[in-house]
Image (cartoon, rainbow, N blue to C red):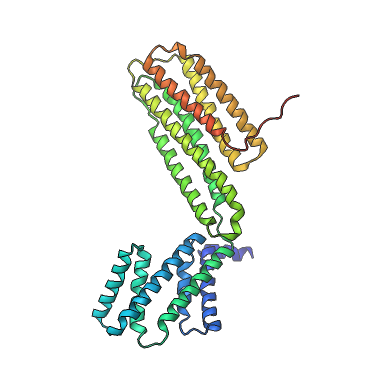
């Protein structure tokens, strides 16, 4: 059995391919055996086209195909009485059909299907009685079977991928914030700006957002995964918080870059170390937040709570020592950094339910 599975995987087969083949075969069987259709291949073709990655995509594809076919069939039935099958008639009917679909602001999939259906009904509908109606019926049948198979047979659940993506996002956000501490060693001089690190974080944020959108699609019209919607709602809220954290990190990078370019910027070594420690402990909050969000375990929430406490203490030390900074411009930039760090801790603490340690009696 193990060798068979390995062979199947090496051959390039996957669940979607198997679903597509099964949907086509079942559609052919139902159309030919139960409905006694003369054209069962229309049902099979509709099933092949309709099976998509998610149930929502399958529903959209089925809707587009059915609307396009009905439009093309009606057009050919209305105009076919006055046209014989010639190159000119094909040109005119396809032109009219696609133009009407375009005027009605239908998408490209529907417009193309209108053209195909118009051509087929014009070519075969005049010689085969019932061709037009059977084309509509078989398409609806194949599309419906494909949607049901996609929804009921191992439906795609993209929520675990969102969790993995969010964990990577949090880890990279924490690493990025920690790496920005190196900019404090180059105050008053042109050096590393941290832009490349922040750009990489933005790309990771975009990837995480796409994973979330795919998960939302995978749960749409999916009766077997309704229990995952609450979890996805929690992850969506956490994604908003992470995107806010990313904005704060970008603000910190800009403030540090301004400090580098300031001619009179001066921070003593002791305060620089304190600020670096505050940034690192805040970065630890982000990493702990990701782990607590994904696992939901009380132990991970305790780690997050402890990290928040440490970050707040380190930030307070920096705030108490701001009076040692004489330059107003430098004070403004440092204050902006501390404000952003405080907001990051607030975002990591807004997760619910946040673990609270037991009260000591």
Residues 292 and 284: in front is 292
Image quadrant in which the C terminus is located: top right
Question: Which residue does the image show at 43% across and 70% down from the upper left?
Answer: 66
Q: Nearer the viewer, residue 342 or 170?
A: 342
Q: Could you tell me which quadrant the N terminus lies in?
A: bottom right
Tell whether 326 sits left or right of 2: left
> Camera-side residue: 137 or 109?
137
Give the x, y percent position of residue 69: 40, 73
| Residue 272 in the image, given as x and y percentages of width and height | 46, 18
Q: Residue furthest left?
A: 88
Q: Quadrant of residue 359?
A: top right
On the question of residue 346 being in view, the answer is yes
Q: Is residue 39 left or right of residue 234?
A: left
Classify 297 as above or below 190: below
Q: Residue at x 62, y 53 (%)?
A: 227
Relative horizontal placement of residue 138, taking residue 154 as reference (left or right): left
Name the residue furthest right: 361
- In this picture, is 128 found above or below 8? below
Asked if 230 appears above or below 328 in the picture, the reply is below
* Location of residue 84 by image quarter: bottom left
Image location (x, y in percent) of residue 163: 56, 46
Picture coordinates of residue 244, whole percent (x, y):
47, 36
Q: Is residue 83 visible?
A: no
């Amino acid at each position: 059995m193990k060798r068979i599975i390995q062979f199947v995987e090496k051959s390039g087969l996957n669940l979607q391919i198997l679903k597509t083949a099964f949907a086509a075969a079942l559609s052919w069987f139902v159309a030919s055996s139960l409905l006694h259709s003369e054209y069962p291949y229309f049902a099979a073709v509709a099933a092949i086209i309709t099976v998509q990655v998610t149930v929502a995509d399958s529903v959209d594809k089925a809707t587009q195909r059915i609307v396009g076919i009905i439009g093309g069939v009606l057009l050919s039935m209305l105009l076919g009485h006055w046209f014989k099958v010639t190159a000119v008639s094909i040109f005119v009917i396809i032109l009219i059909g696609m133009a009407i679909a375009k005027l009605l602001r239908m998408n490209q999939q529907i417009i193309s299907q209108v053209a195909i259906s118009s051509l087929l009904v014009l070519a075969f509908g005049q010689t085969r009685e019932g061709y037009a109606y059977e084309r509509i019926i078989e398409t609806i049948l194949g599309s419906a079977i494909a949607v049901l198979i996609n929804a009921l047979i191992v439906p795609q659940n993209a929520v675990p991928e969102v969790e993995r993506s969010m964990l990577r996002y949090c880890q990279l956000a924490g690493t990025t914030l920690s790496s920005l501490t190196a900019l404090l060693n180059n105050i008053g001089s042109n050096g590393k700006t941290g832009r490349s690190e922040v750009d990489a974080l933005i790309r990771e944020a975009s990837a995480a957002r796409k994973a979330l959108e795919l998960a939302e699609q995978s749960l749409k019209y999916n009766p077997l995964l309704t229990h995952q919607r609450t979890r996805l709602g929690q992850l969506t809220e956490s994604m908003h918080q992470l995107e806010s954290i990313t904005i704060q990190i970008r603000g910190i990078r800009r403030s540090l870059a301004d400090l580098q370019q300031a001619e009179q910027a001066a921070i003593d070594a002791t305060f620089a170390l304190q600020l670096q420690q505050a940034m690192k402990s805040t970065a630890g909050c982000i990493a702990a937040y990701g782990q607590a969000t994904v696992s939901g375990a009380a132990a991970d929430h305790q780690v997050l709570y402890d990290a928040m406490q440490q970050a707040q203490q380190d930030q307070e030390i920096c705030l108490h020592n701001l009076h040692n900074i004489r330059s107003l411009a430098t004070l403004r930039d440092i204050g902006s950094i501390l404000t952003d760090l405080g907001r990051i801790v607030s975002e990591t603490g807004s997760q619910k339910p946040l673990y609270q340690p037991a009260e000591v009696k």
